[in-house]
Structures are given as structure tokens and as C-alpha cells.
Image (spheres, helix red, strand yellow):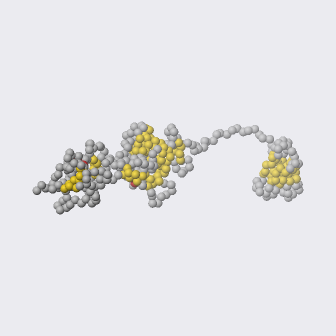
Amino acid sequence: MALTFDGDTTQVTITPERKSSIVVTKPSDISIDVTTADALVKTITQSLVKNTVNVSVPSPTSMTVTKPSDITVEVLEKGSRGPQGIQGEQGPSGADGRGVVEGGDKYQVLSKASDTDYDTAWVDMAVTQTVKNVSGGVLQKGTPVHAVTEASPQGQLAYVIAARADTPSSMPATFVLNEDLADESEGQAIVTGYISGVDTSAFAAGDVVYVGETGGYTNVKPTGNNLIQNLGVVIKSHVSSGSGMIYGSGRSNDVPNLAEGKFFIGSSTNTLQSIYTLPTSDGTDGQVLTTDGSGSVTFRDASGGLSDVVDDSSPQLGGDLDVQTSSLFTSTTNGNITLTPNGTGYINLDGTIKFRRFSTPPTAFEGGMYADDQDNLFFGVSDS
């Protein structure tokens, strides 16, 4: 059903025969109201530039269309829906969406490979850091590297050189490279975790590896003055697909190696290596430790000293002799004790002299002197 009302008619009422819609055709620059007996259904405003507007009602009911008096509007009730047409042919498939990248090994995880959207890669599980090679040469994957101070650092980069156990300024190994790096190039290094794709053919699974004396890694613990840093353990031995677990980057041993014969002395810096060297094997019975004054201490036979005073045939005192409460005596039967000044010197007895009293006078001799039990003092003189 179609109804056209011209400029003389301002309202028209239409009653659809079923739940449906009407189509109102009007000029684009005017406003029209569509109402039912209960309420306003729709206001078709000037902002609607389409000339034809669909108006739906929930059930068959009368609708009143109100318009200005100077225009013509057509109201059309929609007919029933016709049968569904034949389905058309399927169109071409669209481009594949972004998915998970192929590949990856067991236990690997998906990680961003760059700042670019959807740029991902399968990687071994590890804690990593972006580093820059400033060593002046190429550094291979698996190389232990030492972080150094850069004059003009950029971002969160760590600047690295090859670590080596014989050079304290190149220790400890802060990271282990997870890729080859040309000089001045950036890449990933491992702080701790799993590494694969490296040459471990010189080792056996389970070997502990250390920073090498001149760089790289070794299963021989450094000796001598070389610093010791345990990097991790070998998991798989292979020339190109070897693997291991890194757990010791970032620190050297608290106690370094000592040269043969050296020892640590307590100091304000915890330990100080001795400046002299002790022998590494025992001496023979009676030998003593002797220094050469240049840092070398050895076992030698005793010389220039006494193991027993009786061995000294010409003893001399370097100071006064203090006998305290002891006595000077001889153990030789009827032995004499002689005090002999030199030249015109004399014996100075500075103090009171006490003589032994003899109840029976001893045999007199020239120069002798004794006291009897009556405190008489006797001197021996020559018979002549």
C-alpha cells in the first residue's frame, strides 16, 4: 500500500496489516514526525539527507505521519519478505593472519626478536642482556665476556670485551654471548640459563667449565696467579650443537689462586698475599728456616748460632749477666773458678763480700784467702 499526501494535507494515518515497517519518502531538508496512539515512534529530522527513511513498529498498529503543509510526502508500507535467493559462490580466501612461527625445540619459549610487531622467534629459556662488542675484534657465540665502562653509554646496552683469567681487568665474566658479534655490533648475551649451539666437543657431559687463562672456556681449573670463575656445567658434548647450563657469570672466586709457597696474611682488605715464599716440603731433623732477605725462605743446617751452650768454645755476653737467685759454680770435682781481668785491669766487687767459714782450716796456698769459724780472715803467702 502506498499513500501520497500533498501540500494540503498535513497528517495521514496508516495501519499496517502485520508487524512490519513503513517507508517514508520526503524532501531532505524538512522534519517529519511518525507517531502511534501511544507515543512518538520517530522524528525524521533535517539532518537525515536520505529522502527515504524506514520506520518500524512492534506490532500492527496505526501510525500517523505529520509533515509541513507545503510539501508532498509518500508513505509506503513494506510488503512481506520474499523467498531467500540462491546462495552465491564462495569468494576467494583472504590472506593468512599472523600465527606462531614454525620450528623450535623442546622446552624453548617464544620471544620477541625485535621491536617490530609479530617478529618472534623460539629461544632457549635464559635471562639475557643486550650487549655491544667493543673488544676490537669478532667475538664468537659462547665467549665469556666482561662488562666495561663506556665513556658515552647508550640506552640499556652493556659494553663488553672478552674475559680472560690471567688479566684481572678483564674479569669477572659478566655474561656469555648467545650469538656471534662483530666489532661494534649489538646482540644477546646470557646472564644465567641454558645455552645451545656451541662447541663442547672437548668436554664430557657433566664437566664444570671455567673462564680460560687466555679467554674462552675450559674444564681445567686455572692455577697460579690466574683468577678462578666457575661458569657452569656441560649438558651435551658436540662439536656444533653442544649445550650447557650457565650459572656462574658475574663473579670470580672470593679467594683467588696462590703461587706455590705463598700464603694469605690478614689485612684491612681481608687478605694480603705474603711477600716471601715458604718451602713446599719439610726439611731434615735439626734444620732451621732461613731467609735470603729477598723473599725466599728455605730449610738449612743451623750455622752462626747454638743448639746447646756447651758447643760454644768462646762465648761472649752482649750485656750484663743477671743470675737473679741462681749461682755461678762448677760441676768439676775440686774445680776452680777463675776471674781474669785483662792487662792492668782488676776485679771490682761492688758490695759486701761474704766468705765461707771453715771450722777446719783448708790447705794453704799462695794467694789463697779464707775465713775460719771465728771470723778470722787468712791469706796464703809464699814460703819464701
Where is residue 243 drawn, in percent x and y? 44, 40
Q: In the figure, residue 231 lies in which quadrant?
A: top left
Q: Which residue is painted at 37% across and 42% down in the image?
A: 220
Say which of 351 and 153 sits in front: 351
Where is residue 174 drawn, in percent x and y? 45, 50
Q: In the figure, residue 294 lies in which quadrant?
A: bottom left
Q: Which residue is painted at 47% across and 60% down in the image?
A: 152
Say which of 321 and 65 sits in front: 321
Q: Which residue is painted at 32% across and 47% down in the image?
A: 261
Q: Quadrant of the N terminus?
A: top right
Residue at the bottom extreme of this rendering? 344
Where is residue 46 drawn, in percent x and y? 79, 57
- The image shows residue 379, relative to residue 257, as above or below, that is below
**Left or right: where 137 falls relative to 358:** right
**Left or right: where 131 falls relative to 66:** left
Q: Which residue is painted at 48% across and 47% down in the image?
A: 191
Residue 31 is at least partly visible in this image:
yes
Q: Quadrant of the C terminus?
A: bottom left
**Left or right: where 265 falls relative to 102:** left
Residue at the left extreme of this rendering? 384
